[in-house]
């Protein structure tokens, strides 16, 4: 059994191992925020350095992925402040699977490219919520924590982002009549 010299060493080891396991998700989230691989990799690298440097601040029992998403989002906002006019596009590449219906595959790829382009046109706040909830699968509460906003703000931004995407895709936004999350 491994014994650590301190709680800090144990936390750093846990965070380091967690980062390694979460790296594909962190890169996908960063790519969705930045719109390109180079910026995403830079943001993830900076965020990982910050996370490892402040591993002692991570509270045991909290979601490591949410904590890391928050760091990535903060690093990206800092970068945006530096750049002011830089705007990104796109989501991570879809995984291609061999075989299947070629026409359906091509249509799906074209639709994905269209969604990527439209996601890039969303305001940063809506795009970040859409990425966290719809792409990364975080719940509203976790997304609110990552973005440091009230849960109602997450719900509002998500609803506006979804409606904007559906409208731009030529589909009518659906209303949720029974009060369930849509």
Image (cartoon, grey):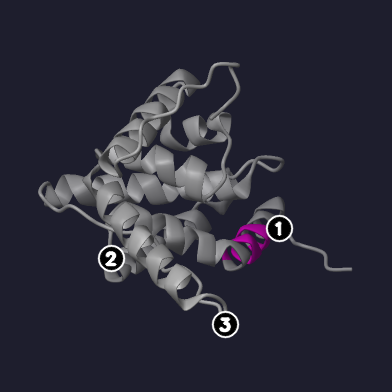
- The label nearer to you, 1 versus 2, is 2
User: Toward which corner of the image does residue 160 lie, by quadrant?
Assistant: top left
**Residue 45 left/right relative to 68:** left
- The label nearer to you, 3 versus 2, is 3
Give percent across and percent down for residue 132. 47, 44
* Mark 3, residue position: 99
Residue at position x 38%, y 35% in the image: 162
The quadrant the N terminus occupies is bottom right
* Mark 2, residue position: 36
* Mark 1, residue position: 10
Give percent across and percent down for residue 138. 56, 41
Query: Crowding at label 1, few (<14), some or many (≥20) Cα neighbours within 10 Å?
Result: some
Task: State yes or no: residue 14 in magenta.
Answer: yes
Please tell me whether mark 3 sits on a helix, a strand or a loop: loop
> As displayed, is residue 29 above or below residue 94?
above
Query: Crowding at label 2, few (<14), some or many (≥20) Cα neighbours within 10 Å?
Result: some
Residue at position x 33%, y 53% in the image: 115
Question: Which region of the structure is painted magenta?
Answer: 13-19
> As displayed, is residue 165 above or below residue 19?
above
Q: Nearer the viewer, residue 9 or 17?
A: 17
Tag of residue 117:
none
Residue at position x 35%, y 38% in the image: 171
């Amino acid at each position: 059994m491994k014994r650590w010299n301190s709680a800090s060493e144990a936390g750093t080891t846990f965070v380091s191992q967690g980062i390694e396991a979460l790296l594909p998700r962190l890169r996908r989230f960063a790519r969705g925020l930045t719109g390109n691989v180079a910026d995403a990799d830079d943001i993830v690298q900076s965020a990982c350095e910050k996370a490892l440097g402040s591993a002692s601040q991570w509270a045991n029992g909290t979601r490591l992925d949410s904590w890391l998403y928050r760091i990535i989002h903060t690093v990206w906002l800092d970068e945006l402040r530096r750049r002011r006019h830089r705007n990104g596009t796109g989501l991570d590449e879809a995984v291609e699977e061999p075989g299947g219906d070629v026409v359906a595959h091509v249509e799906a790829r074209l639709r994905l490219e269209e969604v990527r382009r439209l996601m890039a046109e969303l305001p940063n706040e809506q795009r970040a919520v859409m990425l966290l909830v719809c792409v990364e699968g975080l719940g509203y509460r976790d997304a609110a924590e990552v973005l440091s906003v009230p849960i109602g703000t997450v719900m509002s931004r998500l609803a506006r982002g979804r409606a904007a995407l559906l409208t731009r895709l030529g589909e009518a936004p659906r209303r949720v009549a029974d009060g369930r999350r849509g």
